[in-house]
Image (spheres, helix red, strand yellow):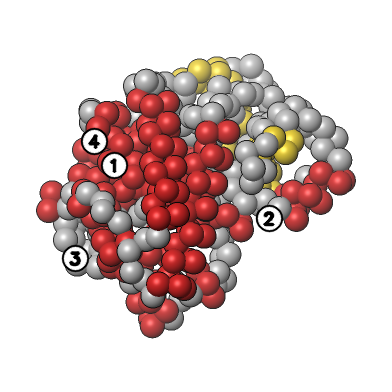
Amino acid sequence: MKLTNINKLEPGQLIGQPLYDDREHILIKKGTPLTKYMIKRLEDMSYSYVYVYAEDNDYEVSDVIRPELRQKAVNSLRKLASNLSGDSASTGGSKASKQTVVQMNIVRASVADVVDELFTQKNIVVEMIDVKQMNSALYQHSVNTMIHATILGTAAGLDRNSLEKLAMGALFHDIGHLMTPPEILRKKTPLTEEESLIAQAHTTKGFAFLTDQFDMAPTIKIVALEHHEKYDGSGYPQGKGGEDLHLFSRITAIANKFDSLTSERPYRRPESLSECVEYIMGGGGSHFDPKLTKIYIQHINPYPVNTLVKLNDGRVATVVETNRQFFMRPKVKIIKGDEKGTIIDLMHSLNTVIETDLTMS
């Protein structure tokens, strides 16, 4: 499959992953041939990228949780944010209304469902980028960060109770952005120094908001405050580092950055899984907890079997076998030129590396 920009879709292409509407109903089933009307509908719904089958590379990748469960979590969070906006307008920011508390309990139930699904999959591996709608980007990013934090927390050996608290903290890590001016969040050019400070304030505002609005465990709220801190102490808002940062914050920092890199922004396209893995690996020990970084990259496979790639010497190949110990160096088969059919094990051919993933367009 290829992750394809909505502007490059053509009628007749087959959808590679099911797409859902805001009510958790299937919008387009997996394997459905696209029509001009469907493509226009996807544009109207603010999709930027979707997976489609590629004639030269029809491989399957699966989401780490059921798509309908992911959509349910997004919808419950969106409804909660809507209620919170109403509370703030009518009560001036005092404790959440009874209606909002009820909705928070619905969110908690949704989080528990996600944790239950992931907790049973100890060796889960991420092999695809989540497709997002621009008008729901904040909620989808929050849910994706929760999912990736839960995967990492599970791999790090957290118990079921701790995982649920971690998941809640990760889900609400960006709650302070509800108070960030939309024009800053959507700006297509670099932020000014003043705008950057306003954007960074979402950490302290989010922590204060959760404290004021809800009776929430400190280990949940702390993630909103600390998720932009760095392991070397160069982050914000407090410049804390190392194990002075809560474990949940260190986990969420990795999950947050990974999903941010794979998300489209007004000023850039999403990065490929391989580019994201390289970034996270490079940040281990400086931006991120080095032990958690090593654990996390063992659960991200940027090159599933049949992925089309370009090698550093210009040859085009397809992945025929992944290396569970080091996903960045799989076995590949040359598919063009005089060496067509030749299989290369990148674990042993150390001068050969994958330069580009050709399955993203």
For marks 2 and 3, the one nearer the N-term is 2
- The residue located at (81%, 51%) in the rendering is 40
- The residue located at (34%, 41%) in the rendering is 167
In front of the other: label 4 or label 3?
4
Q: Quadrant of the N terminus?
A: top right
Classed neighbour count for the residue bearing mark 3: other residues with Cα under 10 Å, few (<14), some (14–19), many (≥20): some
Real-space CA distance between mark 1 and mark 4, rounded to the nearest whole angstrom: 6 Å
User: Quadrant location of residue 265?
Assistant: bottom right
Mark 3: amino acid: Gly
Residue 162 circle label = 4
Q: Are marks 1 and 4 in contact (CB under 8 Å)?
A: yes
In front of the other: label 2 or label 4?
4
User: Quadrant location of residue 287?
Assistant: bottom left
Q: Secondary structure at mark 1?
A: helix
Q: Give residue 196's position: percent from left, percent from top.
A: 39, 75
For marks 4 and 3, the one nearer the N-term is 4
Q: Determine whether 207 is above or below 70 in the image.
A: below
Q: Residue under circle 2?
A: 46
Q: Residue under circle 3?
A: 239
Q: Are marks 2 and 1 in contact (CB under 8 Å)?
A: no
Q: Secondary structure at mark 3?
A: loop
Classed neighbour count for the residue bearing mark 4: other residues with Cα under 10 Å, few (<14), some (14–19), many (≥20): some
